[in-house]
Image: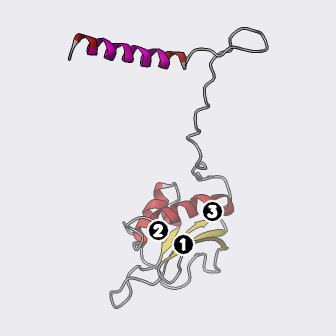
Amino acid sequence: MTSRGARLLLAAAGVALLAGCTALAPAPDETTGGTAAPTSSPEPSTSSAPPEPVLVVGGSAEDNLPVFAAVTNSVWSSVQYPSGRAYIDALVAAGFDKAAMQVTEDISTVGNPAESIQFSVRWADECLIGQVGPATGEPVAVVAPVLAEGTCLIGQTRPIDW
């Protein structure tokens, strides 16, 4: 490169540098005749998602339905969705009492995946009940009264012995 070419390159770089600096300079303020402070665009909000629901220990079953439903939906959208144990483990991790839970079998008597899995948590005189599976479609989470037997699910359930 010739010395003239080098000077032109340096001059172009200097002009670009100065142009970048003047873009940050304060603009004249027409109301006072002075200069206004540079304006910046507001930062985008990073908290657009609603807060995760949390267990309300002294609350009702209805108060805790949002966290129960969130746990149900989370497991349903994971690779562990066909496992009843996954729902129980996730509910325990969310703070629900394992001793108050029931779950149905996730494998049929002939060894096929169950068409539907139900699981529950007894909460005082009410039950949080979830149902998932191909026959159900989208996950279901509801509050229902405790059955006369003192349980939440009708029929045979599997032992939660893990």
**Residue under pointer 3:** 65
Name the image quarter holding the C terminus.
bottom left
Q: Residue at x 47, y 78 (%)?
A: 133
Q: Please tell me whether residue 86 is drawn above or below residue 117 in the rendered image.
A: above
- Disc 1 to disc 3, C-alpha distance: 13 Å
- Asked if disc 2 and disc 3 are in contact, CB closer than 8 Å, the reply is no
Dot in front, 1 or 3: 1
Going by the numbered disc 1, the residue's amino acid type is: Pro
Q: Please tell me whether residue 137 is drawn above or below residue 108 in the rendered image.
A: above
**Residue under pointer 2:** 76
Q: Residue at x 60, y 80 (%)?
A: 149
Going by the numbered disc 3, the residue's amino acid type is: Leu
Q: Please tell me whether residue 89 is drawn above or below residue 103 in the rendered image.
A: above
* Image x and y of residue 30, in percent: 76, 15
Q: Residue at x 38, y 82 (%)?
A: 113
Q: Which residues are magenta?
A: 5-19
Instruction: Specify the farthest residue to the right.
Output: 31
Going by the numbered disc 2, the residue's amino acid type is: Trp
The rendered magenta stretch, by its main secondary structure, is classed as helix
- Asked if disc 1 and disc 3 are in contact, CB closer than 8 Å, the reply is no
- Asked if disc 1 and disc 2 are in contact, CB closer than 8 Å, the reply is yes
Local crowd size for mark 2, using a 10 Å CA cut-off: few (<14), some (14–19), many (≥20)? some
Q: At numbered mark 2, what does the secondary structure look like: helix, strand or loop? A: helix
